């Protein structure tokens, strides 16, 4: 009798700049060295790699990330023979990714999910809270707080260099805002004053896309 393959879910969570992608790449590279059949997905919203995201091992094996917009695209594109599925920037996907990765793990695959677990307000980001609850293994990484040098656990959104208020979309496409890694003490989410409310409204009217 053939024993069923043993699947599981690993989540690499943490603040921006904490090295989640580096850790995902390390795990995928080792899976390639082990000769596993690996597929790598990443949200199309992350264009840090200019649309290209390739992982190669020293022995010449390499895979390209497949850009996806939602969880259904992950489910539809996993090949039956795949042994390891990696998903980067999972915070941008919908809650359906939880059922998808559960089904893949049930089918015997090792699933590695990386994502920012908190949004700029310090709230759970997209499906990450649900994924963390379902995972067999969790690693929560920290960055370095740019203000005090302590371990950073929070994403600080800045608009024109100033801490951004809680209002405004969680994900901004084509935004002029920037982000910093900060510790709990240095992380600021001020209530918007009148000028900031007007600025946010004006940007909304100019077609800033919030999703
Ligand atoms: P993530 O996927 O978690 O956003 P990456 O793996 O893309 O992180 O990048 C991690 C790298 O970012 C670090 O190795 C370091 O070189 C760099 N980095 C930039 N700013 C910081 C910071 N404030 N704290 C830690 N690393 C930082
Ligand atoms: Zn700090």
Image (spheres, rainbow, N blue to C red):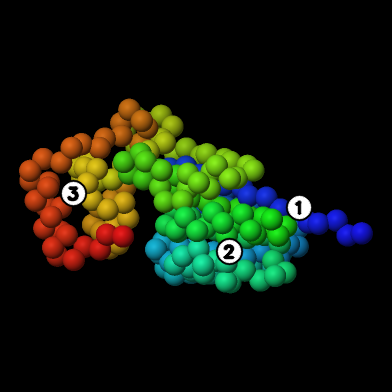
Does residue 17 appear anywhere in the picture? no
Q: Residue at x 36, y 45 (%)?
A: 119
- The label nearer to you, 2 versus 1, is 1
Q: Residues within 10 Å of mark 1 (few under 14, many from 20)?
A: few
Q: Quadrant of the C terminus?
A: bottom left
Report whether the residue tagged 1 is closer than 8 Å to ligand 1. no
Look at the numbered disc 3 and give the secondary structure of its residue. Answer: loop
Q: CA distance from mark 2 to mark 1?
A: 19 Å
Return the disc, 1 or 3, that comes first in the chain's sequence: 1
Report whether the residue tagged 3 is closer than 8 Å to ligand 1. no
Question: Where is residue 76, by image quadrant?
Answer: bottom right
Q: Which residue is mark 2?
A: 40
Tags 2 and 3 in contact by the CB under 8 Å rule? no
Look at the numbered disc 2 and give the secondary structure of its residue. Answer: strand
Q: Is residue 60 above or below residue 185?
A: below
Q: Quadrant of the N terminus?
A: bottom right
Question: Where is residue 189, by image quadrant?
Answer: top left
Give whichever of 42, 79 is nearer the camera: 79
Give whichever of 164, 136 is nearer the camera: 136
Q: Residue at x 18, y 66 (%)?
A: 207
* For residue 127, side relative to residue 35 (left or right): left
The disc label shown at residue 160, or none = 3
Report whether the residue tagged 2 is closer than 8 Å to ligand 1. no
The disc label shown at residue 152, or none = none
Tags 1 and 3 in contact by the CB under 8 Å rule? no
Q: Which residue is mark 1?
A: 6
Q: Is residue 161 above or below residue 73?
A: above
Q: Residue at x 61, y 54 (%)?
A: 102
**Residue 206 image offset from top left, x and y in percent:** 14, 65
Return the disc, 2 or 3, that comes first in the chain's sequence: 2
């Amino acid at each position: 009798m053939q024993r069923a393959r043993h699947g599981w879910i690993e989540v690499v969570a943490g603040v921006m700049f904490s090295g989640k992608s580096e850790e995902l790449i390390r795990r995928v590279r080792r899976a390639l060295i082990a000769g596993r059949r690996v597929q790598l997905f990443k949200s199309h919203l992350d264009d840090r790699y200019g649309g290209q995201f390739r992982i190669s091992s020293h022995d010449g094996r390499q895979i390209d990330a497949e850009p996806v917009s939602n969880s259904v695209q992950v489910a539809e594109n996993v090949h039956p023979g795949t042994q390891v599925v990696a998903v980067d920037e999972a915070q941008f996907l919908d809650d359906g990714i939880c059922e998808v990765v559960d089904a893949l793990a049930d089918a015997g695959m090792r699933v590695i999910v990386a994502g920012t677990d908190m949004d700029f307000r310090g709230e759970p980001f997209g499906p990450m809270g649900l994924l963390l609850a379902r995972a067999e293994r969790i690693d929560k990484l920290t960055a370095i707080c740019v203000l005090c040098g302590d371990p950073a656990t929070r994403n600080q959104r800045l608009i024109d260099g100033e801490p951004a208020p809680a209002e405004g979309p969680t994900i901004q496409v084509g935004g002029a805002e920037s982000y910093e890694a900060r510790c709990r003490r240095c992380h600021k989410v001020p209530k918007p004053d009148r000028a900031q409310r007007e600025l946010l409204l004006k940007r909304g009217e100019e077609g800033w896309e919030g999703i």
